[in-house]
Image (cartoon, rainbow, N blue to C red):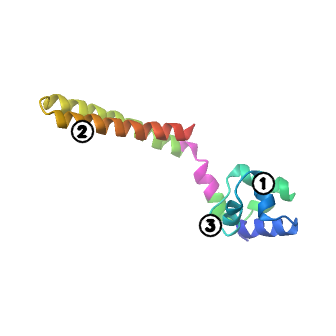
């Protein structure tokens, strides 16, 4: 049985509405509906809250749901996430060095220098966004 069906069955068995459950775990009613219809998956914190709310074990909720297990494995894989961040940092440094070299080769073209500077800001902003997203 998939987690969506398990969540819905547990909610109905507990005589809770989607609105009530959403309020208890601080998400929208649409989020509860999406989880129950397997359009999206809850994060691990929400699964724990649901387990407590419905008075069922995490094992009962998650057992035999391979998609959910894969979702948790992907979303909590810190090593993979750190590798992506390190690759982004190295790429950004390389790009900035290349932009500085190219800008020094063509010092008389103001529009080129503005373009290089703009590209450097965009790349740095993307990297900063990735770092902030990790925090």
Q: Residue 109: tell me if it is visible.
A: yes
Residues at discs 2 and 1 in contact (Cβ within 8 Å):
no
Numbered disc 3: secondary structure: loop
Residue 76: % across, % down:
61, 48
Magenta region's main secondary structure? helix
The residue located at (80%, 62%) in the rendering is 60
Is 93 placed left or right of 102 in the picture?
Answer: right
Q: Which residues are magenta?
A: 71-79
Callout 1: SS: helix
Mark 2 or mark 3: which is in front? 2
Task: Give the quarter of the figure containing the C terminus.
Answer: top right
Q: How far apart are the two marked residues, 2 and 3, measured between alpha carbons?
A: 42 Å
First-in-chain label (2 vs 1) = 1
| Magenta stretch contains residue 134 | no
Q: Residues within 10 Å of mark 1 (few under 14, many from 20)?
A: few
Which residue position is annotated with label 2?
115
Mark identifier at residue 135? none
Identify the residue shown where x is 74% and y is 51%. 26
The spot of residue 115 in percent (x, y) is: 24, 38
Side (left or right) of 24 relative to 42: right
* Disc 3 target residue: 39
Determine whether 22 is above or below 96 in the image: below
Image quadrant for the N terminus?
bottom right
Nearest to N terminus: mark 3 or mark 1:
1
């Amino acid at each position: 049985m998939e987690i969506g069906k398990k969540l819905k069955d547990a909610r109905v068995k507990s005589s809770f509405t989607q609105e009530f459950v959403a309020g208890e775990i601080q998400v929208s009613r649409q989020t509860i509906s999406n989880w129950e219809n397997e359009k999206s998956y809850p994060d691990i914190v929400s699964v724990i809250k649901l387990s407590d709310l419905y008075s069922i074990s995490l094992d009962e909720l998650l057992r035999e749901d391979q998609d959910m297990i894969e979702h948790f494995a992907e979303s909590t894989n810190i090593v993979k996430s750190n590798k992506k961040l390190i690759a982004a940092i190295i790429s950004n440094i390389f790009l900035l060095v290349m932009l500085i070299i190219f800008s020094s080769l063509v010092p008389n073209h103001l529009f080129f220098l503005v373009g290089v500077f703009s590209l450097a800001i965009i790349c740095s902003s993307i990297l900063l966004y990735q770092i902030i997203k990790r925090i």
